[in-house]
Amino acid sequence: LRMLQVKLIVTGDDFGYCPRRNQGIVDCFLAGAISNVSLLVNGSAAADAAKLARRHNIPIGLHANLSEGSPVCEVLKSNSSLLNQDGFFHGKMGFRTALSKGLLNMSEVKQELKAQVELFHELTGHLPPHMDGHQHVHVLPEVRHVFAEVLEEYGIQYTRVPIEPGLHNCDWIPPSLMDFYLGVEEDSFNTVDVFTKHGIRWPDIYIGLSTMGRNMSVSSIRSAIDSAILGLTAKAPHSRTVTIELMVHPGYPSVPPVGGCGEGPDDFSQSWERLHELQTLIKPELQSHYKSRNIQLCSFKDL
């Protein structure tokens, strides 16, 4: 591993979700613990997040959201297939159910994704260098095609494909969550060809499911990175540079009713797990591990 140069993008997801999330993400960035953020443009503190990114020069991309809160496209805010009876998005699992029943109109999905790119541009003054999906909706059947078209139309080069090496060996993940993760993995495998065909790129390695929330520790991040690099170099022994994205969710816990994307903050956002991620990521022993492994933190524009 000595000769190998590793470029690590540590992405703080859900920027814009609430002021306390924003503050935690900024603190992490200023501590050198994350190198990139992903903005929820329908988050209640999105405008504030965009200002903070500009002030601190934080590399920022778009966290496309079709599952939590309200759409940003005016036309879709009433009577659209993307909404439930209460007038909000269907939710993480509800979206998947509606999709599998053929209830979602893909032209509305496209309309909303484009509206989110436009709003991102309005808030930040530039197009997103990378765009991924909140709760991994971007790799779902049908959605993946529309998502790829939108990226190609706007010339957005990078995305995230959540296939995590070693996921199957993580016996600490509870079965119900593992079922969800394995679904995300299968959807991701089926997405690779679609994204490739549209000229979209993503890092060599993705990590983040096995290290989320309470499962995050210096050693869980370290071993996920080390074993992923070993696995990759075994397959391609001649590579000199390896790129990795580590997905993280640091923040200070949300205090309702402030936060969320229209419906208030969810349980994960109010829990201690956000703060736990923040405290883990800024530990000096993690930073020194990066140095010892020749791991350089960067953002998508540095690839």
Image: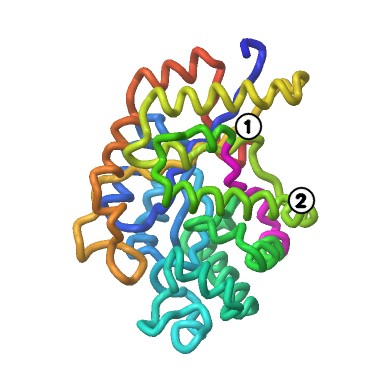
Decide: is 171 above or below 225.
below
Mark closest to the chain's N terminus, 2 or 1 = 2
Decide: is 26 above or below 223.
below
Crowding at dot 1, Cα within 10 Å, few <14 / some 14-19 / many 20+, comes out as many
Is residue 160 at all visible to an observer of this figure? Answer: no
Q: Which of 49/85 is in front?
A: 85
Secondary structure character of the magenta stretch overall: loop
Q: Which amino acid does label 2 sit on?
A: Thr
Q: Mark 2 points at which residue?
A: 196
Q: Which residue lies furthest to the bottom in this view?
A: 79
Q: What residue type is labelled 1?
A: Thr
Task: Determine contact: label 2, label 1, CB under 8 Å.
Answer: no
- Where in the figure is residue 26, as x and y percent of width and height? 35, 42
Q: Which of 36/95 is in front?
A: 95
Q: Mark 1 points at which residue?
A: 243
Q: Quadrant of the N terminus?
A: top right
- Where in the figure is residue 228, as x and y percent of width and height? 59, 27
Decide: is 48 above or below 299.
below
Q: In the shown orientation, is residue 292 left or right of residue 147?
A: left
Range of the magenta residues? 151-164
Q: Is mark 2 on a helix, strand or loop?
A: helix
Q: Which residue is drawn at 19% across and 57% down?
A: 255
Q: In the shown orientation, is residue 1 left or right of residue 34?
A: right
Magenta run includes residue 18: no
**Total numbered badges shown on the rendered structure:** 2
